Image: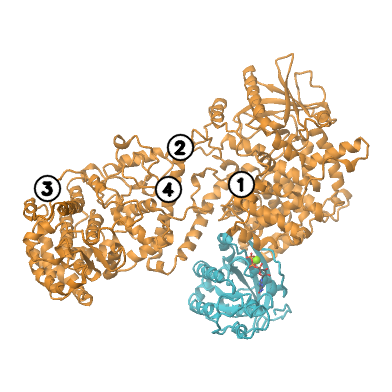
Amino acid sequence: MFNLTNLVQKAQQFIEPALPIAGPAANDRRPSKATLFRYQFRLPDSQSPLQEITAELTLSPHHSQRAAAGDVTSPEKERGQGNHYVGKLHLSEQFLCFSTTGSSFLTTASLSSSSSFTGQTHGAGPAGNGFTLPLCAIRRVERLHSQSYMFALAITTWNGSPDPKGKNATPSGQKLTIQLAGSRQQCERFCDGLKRGLREGVKEVENLRTVVTFTYSEYLLTSDGDEKKGAGEEAKKGTEHPDTGLGLIYRYPGNARKLRDATKIRLWREYLKENGRSATLIRQPTFHKLIRVGLPNRLRGEIWELTSGSWFLRLQNPKLYTETLEKYSGRESLAIDEIEKDLNRSLPEYPGFQSEEGIGRLRRVLTAYSWTNESVGYCQAMNIVVAALLIYMSEPQAFFLLSVLCDRLLPGYYSMTMYGTLLDQKVFESLVEKTMPILWDHLVKYDVQLSVVSLPWFLSLYINSMPLIFAFRVLDVFFLEGPKVLFQIGLAILRINGEELLDATDDGTFISVLKSYFARLDESAHPKSENPKLRAVTRFQELMVVAFKEFAGITQNTISEQRSKHKGAVLANIESFTKRTSIRNLGPESKKLSVNDLGFLYDRFYTVLYERAERAEILQQEADRKAKAAKAKATEVVTGFSGNSVERGRVALGPSPTQMDYDAFREFLAGISKWAITDSPSSPPELNGSQSPHSYFGSSTKNRPSLSPWGSGLEPTDHEFMRRLFRRWDVDMADSLSLQNVVTGFAAVKGTKDIMSNISYFFELYDDDSDGRVDREGILRISEALLFLSRRGVTESGLSPSPSLTDVRSGSPERPNRDEQFLSSVSAFIRRCFEYADPDHPSNQGNQAVDEAQDGLDNFAIGEDDLIDFGSEPDTPTARRHSKNPLSPKPSDKDPLSPVTTNDSTDPIEKERKEKAKAANLALDPNKPLHITLPTFRMVILADEVLEHFFEVGFSSSFKLADAPLLSAASSSNLTTFSNAGKQVAAAASNMGGVVGGAGAGVVPPGKGLRGMLDNIVSDGMRVAAEVRRRYDEVQKDLDSEARHGRDDEDEEEEEKGAPDLLEGAETAGVDTSRGKVEELLGVPGAEAGGEIKTTRNRSASDASRRVLEFER
Amino acid sequence: MADSAPTQPKPSSSVKLVLLGEAAVGKSSLVMRFVNNDFQENKEPTIGAAFLTQKCNLPTRTIKFEIWDTAGQERFASLAPMYYRNAQAALVVYDITKPSSLTKAQHWVAELQRQASPGIVIALVGNKADLASAGGADSSDDADAAPAAEGETNEEEEGTDARRVATRTAKSYADEESLLFFETSAKTGQNVAEVFTAIANAIPETSLKGPRGVGGSTNLNRQEDARVNLAGTGMSMPDKGCAC
Ligand SMILES: Nc1nc2c(ncn2[C@@H]2O[C@H](COP(=O)(O)OP(=O)(O)OP(=O)(O)O)[C@@H](O)[C@H]2O)c(=O)[nH]1
Ligand SMILES: [Mg+2]
């Protein structure tokens, strides 16, 4: 097909400047004109209204011997006999459409139509009189030389197969005259458009020929012509009987005589002869009447196709069905398994479905469809509907009709969550309440649940509720007039049985009343009537009359309105059900978390995925805007659902992403933990403005462009720790996390109150090869992570380590003090780790304990010495430094840690310390690789009261779940690095066209005033780590050069580097603390003595803190 | 089998019962067996739900079951609350030849325990027991599988038959959750009536209401009372006492 979309948009603007072009900006709830246009004429989604003009259609006398509709007053004399219809003529890319029914999408007032019959589709089907001509079916258009001001076109169509060589093509060529009513300019423009379309249409003629040749109408008229020629040459007919469904082989349901099938065929033959066949069919009042009385068996499939619009889909892509089957042949899927289960269980009472032939057809159609629409796949009830279609249609016909059903006529019915089904049940109930309040009250009073009864009516289109022949009559009208027919019939059923239903006081009786009604649909509705005519009226006829007369007020509009009204509640219901079930199925680990927390995680998890999908969608749309007309925009008005894919991620609407990649995980964490929020929100435009706004989606690049991919939420940071957490939680090695993974992950972190297991967990995070050892590199990374995690404070909630630190929230001076304390604890941590580390060579192990014991005492003398030099680069922005830091995540899957393990590694702080810590600790020898074990790690942590506290409560409470959600607390807490966030959010919001109102929308970024001292502390924390890293690298370099130039002792020089001790105050407190405890620890020989350490720990919490107080005093 | 012979003076009450379970485990077939004493190989899948009634005569009273047979396909699950609303009893069915169906059944049990009326009587039913005795023939090594269906724990190993869920596994789960437990065959009729009888017996007197329709509001009140009373009642019932 050709793509005229740019043109379309321009044209649209030109024609109807008032109507916004559907696009991200058009948040208008009103229907897009294009959508309504397509629905009215049942055109494929590729079509859009290019041109429209008021016109009068004149059907040449050849077309009708019937009297013209009388009340048209025309100034033109040439309109002698024939039918005249006033309406609107529309042009789309591939179709020329005409309808007398005031199109509901016109902003202008509709013209009164010339015919009394306007149908009841109200914009939801090919209503009124007119036609929907594929341009390729038009053979010739002539401009008539009209004497007057009128601008008239004579259109000749390919009536029947467009075979130029065919002898009988010419005489039956159908002629229409259309007079355009508009300014000369308008008419010219319309004709130009038409000309262009016709030229393009030539390409489609081949498709048309393929499709049309095998229609029954073609066959009917061709054989008819032969008969008329009287040659009796029926056997010689060029065309063989087209495939009109299984009925051809296994008989059509019902008694053909009783159905008066022959009469119907005769009437249709007459109608088709005058009004064109398949592609060129013109709708006149008789058309609607003929459908209401029931279609003849062999023509049924074709008319269903034409009225539902699936014919046009097939025309566009005649080979799609066979191609799909070929493409997927041999493949397996869940849908196929489900289909297989039901094949033998579909209309088993029809002989065709007890045969391989019928079952084979059913299998192929269902399978092909499941491949073309994998989000629907297969839903029970589709087997019944398709089985019914196959009685009257060929496989490809049924295939395309099924897709029209799923996409347009029964939106969301068969989806994964069946939200469409549930929604329409709600709609139906509310219509019953409105139209039959007494019955409704009765149902409520006796607690009879209506939808339980009516659900199968809608889901399988009455096919397994009524006897087949009647269900098909309903379908005849349904395909023409749209979904509202299902409602009208349903309401009529209740109305007719109202009296009896009012006697029913339980579901059982209620259902049996209806069952017996359905069983007697063919009986007389008025068996006792004197009037034989009245007696002849069957109950089914009565049903049709009630449905379409009494409930004529139920229009497509009614349905759409009701759908939008109930949509929210229905979706919310499904979502809470889904949530409940999926939380319950999270497995035993999840029991460690409270139900509230699980609910919170569930919401947060899917919100992140949903919002990300939404943002990606919007950005995508933005990008596509120029290239693609936003077509499906407001399908909503007709279907009651938003066709707008922005809602796609919503759980209740069907399959949505369920896996979280690393970026999503970061975003997820940012909503839960303060430390996961970035310190340096995306740089302002001047830095990276030139970058493509999409480059960062999917992978985390260092430089972030101005447009935030994080929506209105808080921008996450990226830290090695987060990556480790992600990898640890990703137990399936899928490089993404499911909700299950996340919950299990949290269960491990938060589900236990045991400090020991928290410590082990942390240790394991860094024990990459799970050998129970963490090497130098790992120790550094751990300390860095500790600083990272604590850079916004750790003891926010829960107990403070000591009374002196309680008053943190008020921003009292204690706060910096505490942060400093943490810093010093971390430096003490590094120091101790190296002190107590084991050498990698087992031979040294023996000395270790002794050495430790000795060194331990000395350590405290050096504890106050400055560990790290901050002096060198005080002004470098943290983030910048951080990003240069080799610790930042590397994209490679290979573990970045493993290479740096053994011989060539060294201790960055070793040199500084060496002089003073003359303890000659083996661990400090750069040539002796070392590691710490879990017991050592534990000991070191427990040796420090601040760290101990961190592992006891701080770490796990740094994840805020349901009990204290971060987002609500965020505005009042100390997110100190948010100066840019305001801009950020605003920029993001404007980019999103205001659509996204994410969970973080309520966060008010604190003003600049909050920066300052606190900020410095935070960055200092990072600098400690960065500095450690820098030192480490330098030493590494030195070692390298040493290796080159031979060994040279340069320790003395290093010493000079000592700089002012920034941490002096903190260090004091920290060391005091440690001393208090390490003294205890020293009594324990051997760091591995886990049991002993535990003892210590038990006392330590209280003892140590008391001790701290004492020391401080 | 349940008979509909009217026994005049016995009090009669109706019980709403819902069947839940994975697709094609044989829910509809069980109902068909219970209601019509009939079995069809090609049973149409249930769309939405089907409704049937059947009486069950106990020595002291008559229970009229209002049976809601639901659709098993996964996506129909979100419709289920509509059907189990106010149900007093539930048959959660799995297929003893399909382990996944037991998992699904466990999900249903959890759903019911949380969302359905408190005090709902739940029976866990392993259907297609006829397939367990090795292809319907006479393999004897599993002969005790059938008695096991009487409700007693059984230690049989997985034999060469189609059985994939050990009776023991399901039984111990049922005990844990205080569910009635049976293995049945809709095909042979084995244990089908027993399930319904056991349920009828397990419904506490207090929760029984008269035939519906006496008066909506009174009904509701009584139901509320029943719920309160039921809350504390242990649900582990002896699986005996077929008097249907
Ligand atoms: N061998 C054997 N087959 C059974 C038994 N019960 C049911 N089946 C077969 O299992 C298939 C499914 O049975 P249904 O009763 O329709 O299953 P269902 O659970 O109602 O299925 P849905 O309505 O789709 O949820 C049918 O082909 C039955 O013949 C049984 O006890 N033994
Ligand atoms: Mg069933």
Which color is chain B depicted in? cyan
Q: Quadrant of ligand 1?
A: bottom right
Q: Is residue A458 left or right of residue A1035?
A: right
Q: Choose the circle earlier in sequence order: 1 or 3.
A: 1
Q: Choose the circle earlier in sequence order: 2 or 3.
A: 2
Circles 1 and 3 in contact, beta carbons < 8 Å = no
The residue where tag 2 is placed is: A622
* Residue type (three-letter) at the residue carrying disc 2: Glu
Seen in the picture, residue A687 relative to A1109 is either above or below; the reply is: above
Q: Choose the circle earlier in sequence order: 2 or 1.
A: 1
On the question of residue B214 being in view, the answer is no
The residue where tag 4 is placed is: A612
The reply to the same-chain question for discs 2 and 3 is yes
Image location of residue A403, percent across then percent down: 64, 47
The reply to the same-chain question for discs 3 and 4 is yes
* Residue type (three-letter) at the residue carrying disc 1: Asp
Mark 3 nearby-residue class (10 Å; few <14, some 14–19, many ≥20): some
Q: Chain of mark 2?
A: A
Q: How far, Cα to Cα, is label 1 from label 4?
A: 25 Å
Select label 2 or label 1 by which is in front: 2
Select label 2 or label 3 by which is in front: 3
Which color is chain A depicted in? orange
The residue where tag 1 is placed is: A407
Q: How far, Cα to Cα, is label 3 from label 4?
A: 42 Å
Q: Chain of mark 3?
A: A
User: SS at mark 4?
Assistant: helix
User: SS at mark 2?
Assistant: helix
Seen in the picture, residue A460 relative to B102 is either above or below; the reply is: above
